[in-house]
Image: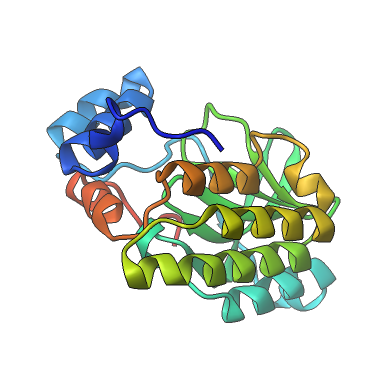
Amino acid sequence: MASVDPRHAWMRNSAAGLRLQLLLKAPAKHIGSLVRMKTAIRPATLDFMAISQEEINHSVLLLEAQRLSDRLEPYANNNTMFRSSLKRCMVDGRNLAIFGRVLDGLFFVDLTDGSAGLLPIDCETTPQYCNSDLESFAAFHVAFMEAIQPAIITNSGVTERVLMELEAAFRKRDASSMADERSFWSMRLYELSEGFFPLSSEKVELHRSLGIDLCHPW
């Protein structure tokens, strides 16, 4: 894992740095809204429809997504939350059921192949692959939460040993999750290794101060 350039370290440890990162990552059409902080920001081109409990009861995948959303642990420092009130979203012909969210996207299960992914809040960005199935997603989430707890308690970074063990466990459980360095869990491990993954509430508080809707689409 590469070390962090000290010239950039300040960006991880200050509200100004986080604000700059958010502005740099935002599409040009959103920058004015981020700067003005006048209205809540939410994706304008994604349409969501509530999935009825009757439909959920007749679908193995939807029932599994609902049950997992009830038992998976939220993580406030990056706004990870799961909702049993599932939402449907059609993206590029894919029938997706949204069962949770994080700061930069919405967790979904593809109702065609059962894979789990992250639909970015920025509609112009390609969905990120998470796992080949929901049970693997749940196992990864639990393992990841357990791995970062000591770092949160001690207010320190995650050790190289923990990162290596976590990556090995991920590859053993669901190798496809680590096949692409741009996949969701590959990026989470990279963020941990570089100190970018939020272990405090600072990043969430910054998003909230910018007027970003942290509960959309619920």
Is the residue 80 above or below the residue 67 in the image? above
Q: Name which residue lies at 29% across and 41% down.
A: 12
Where is 140 relative to 193, above or below?
Answer: below
| Along the viewing direction, whichever of 172 and 204 lies nearer the viewer | 172
Residue visible at 66% across and 40% down in the picture: 183
Query: Whole-percent x and y of residue 62?
Result: 74, 68
Q: Return the residue nearer the eye: 134 or 170.
A: 170
Q: Position of residue 47 (x, y in %)?
A: 54, 45
Apparent side of residue 179 relative to residue 163 in the rendered image (left or right)? right
Q: To which quarter of the image does residue 11 belong?
A: top left
Quarter assignment of residue 72: bottom right
**Numbered disc total:** 0
Quadrant occupied by the C terminus: bottom left
Visible residue check, residue 184: yes
* Left or right position of 11 against 85: left
- Residue at point 83%, 58% (across, down): 172
Q: Residue furthest top?
A: 28
Query: In the figure, residue 51 lies in which quadrant?
Result: bottom right
Counting from the top left corner in percent of width and height, residue 213 is at: 32, 51
Image coordinates of residue 101 in percent, x first then y, are: 50, 57
Q: Is residue 26 visible?
A: no
Q: Residue at x 47, y 57 (%)?
A: 158
103 or 2, which is in the foreground? 2
Figure check: 21 above or below 95: above
Vertical placement of residue 101 versus 61, above or below: above
